[in-house]
Amino acid sequence: MSTVDWNHYREQFPALSKRAYFGWAAVAPLSTRVAARMRAQIEGVVQHGVTEYREWYKTYDSLREEARKLIGATNTGEIALLKNTSEGISTAALGLGLHAGENVLLPCGEFPANAYPWLALTAKGVEVRRVKTDEFGRYTCDDIARQVDAKTRAVAVSFVNFATGFRSDLATIGRFCRERGIFFFVDAIQGLGALPLDVGAMCIDALAADGHKWICGPEGMAIFFVRRAWISKIRPLSLGWWSVDNPSRYDLDDQPLTQDARCYECGTLTTVAASGLLEALQLLNTVTVRELSERIEILTTDLVARLREHGCMVRRAEGPDEWSGILSFDVPGHDAQVIARTLEEAHVIVSPRGGRLRAAVHGWNNVQDSMRLLEELPRLAH
C-alpha cells in the first residue's frame, strides 16, 4: 500500500479546493510550486536582465535531465525542448524524408496533432494506412502487423487515446517495429506523467509530449525525444543559431549542426515555461509515476462504478493494460456539450469529446471529487 500523503500534494493545487477537477487531459491547473518558480524567473529578468542568462542555460540542462529520467532515455543528448507536441510530431513526420510509394501506419481516432503531419505526406505520394479501432479506440499489434509490408517506414500511435482513454501496447508494437527497422513514433501527451513509460524497454524511436496536461506544467514547452540512432536521419524543419555545434560562435557563417537532439531547437527557448516545466517534473519525481498510476487506477475504478450505478453508459477500455486516467461516458437523453457547461457552472470540470463526456482522473484527485460529480449529475436527469 502506498505511503504517499496525497493530501499534501493536493494542497499544492489551489484550483482543487474550489472544483472537482477532471480536466487534466485538457489543461492542468498549476501548482503553487510551479507558479512560484515561474514568477521567480520573471522577477530575475525584471531585476537583472541578461546577467541571468547562465541560470537560464542551467534550467534547460536540468529540464533535459529530469525529462530523461522520466522517460528512461539513455542521455540528455536525446532530448530536445520544443514549444508543443505538434512541433515534435511535425519534425518527426516531415523530417524523415519519406518518398512516394512508401507508407506509414496510423490508428483511426488519433488526435489531430498526431494525424495532420502524417496525412500531409500524402501530397508527396506517401500512403497513410489507417489501422481500424473498435468503439473503445482499441487495436492490437496484430492489427498493425496485417498492414505492414516492405514499404512500411513508420508507425505512429498515441500512448493514450485522447477521447476513449485506451492505452496502446507500446512495448509489443515497439519490439515489432524494431525487429523490422520501422520507425516507431509515440504521441505521449495523454499518458506521460501519469503512467509509466520507458523509451528503451518499449523500443520507441521518437516521442513528443507537451507538459501542460498530466505533467502539470505550463503551456508552451514540450519534450521531444529522438533515439540517438535516428537523429542524423530526421532533418530539422527549422534552423537557427542554437541548432549548430557551437552556438556561441556568432562569427562563423558555416557550422555543422550539433549531433544531438539540440539540433531541433532552432532558437531562444521560452525560459519561463522551461522553469515551470522543470519544477513540475521535480514535483512528479518526489513521488514515483508508478505510485501515481496505482492511485489513478483506484480512483478511476471507483468513479466507473459510481457512474454505472447512476445509469451512465461508461465507454472505456478496461483490459489489464488498456485503462488510463481518461474515461468517457454518456448521460442517456442529454447532450454532452450542455452537460459539460452545466457542470462547469457547478464547479465540476469535465470535457465534451466526440459526443460524450470525458473525465480525466489524476492522482491529485480524491473520492470526494467523484462524489461531487455524481451529486450534480442527478439534477441533469430531470
Image (cartoon, rainbow, N blue to C red):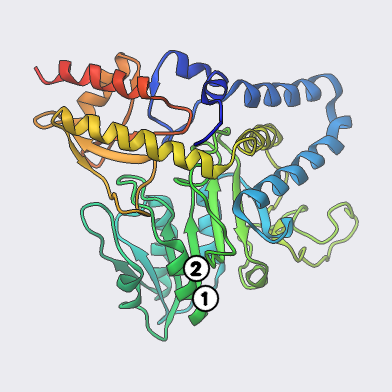
Is 83 or 150 nearer to us in this picture? 150
Name the front one of labels 1 and 2. Answer: 1
Is 51 or 222 nearer to us in this picture? 222
Which amino acid, mark 1?
Arg
For label 1, the SS is: helix
Residue 18 left/right relative to 262? left
Residue visible at 56% across and 66% down in the picture: 205
Is 223 or 140 nearer to us in this picture? 140
**Does residue 258 appear anywhere in the picture?**
yes
Q: Quadrant of the C terminus?
A: top left
- Percent across and percent down for residue 292 are 50, 38
Residue 2 left/right relative to 42? left
For label 2, the SS is: strand
The answer to which image quadrant residue 218 occupies is top right
- Percent across and percent down for residue 154 are 46, 72
Which amino acid, mark 2?
Phe
Callout 1–callout 2 Cβ contact below 8 Å? yes
**Does residue 360 appear anywhere in the picture?**
no
Q: Which residue is mark 1?
A: 178
Residue visible at 40% across and 17% down in the picture: 19
Q: Considering only order in the chain, which callout, 2 or 1, is on the residue closer to the N terminus? A: 1
Numbered badge on residue 184: 2
The CA distance from mark 1 to mark 2 is: 8 Å
Count how many numbered circles sit on residues in the image: 2
Residue visible at 50% across and 63% down in the picture: 185
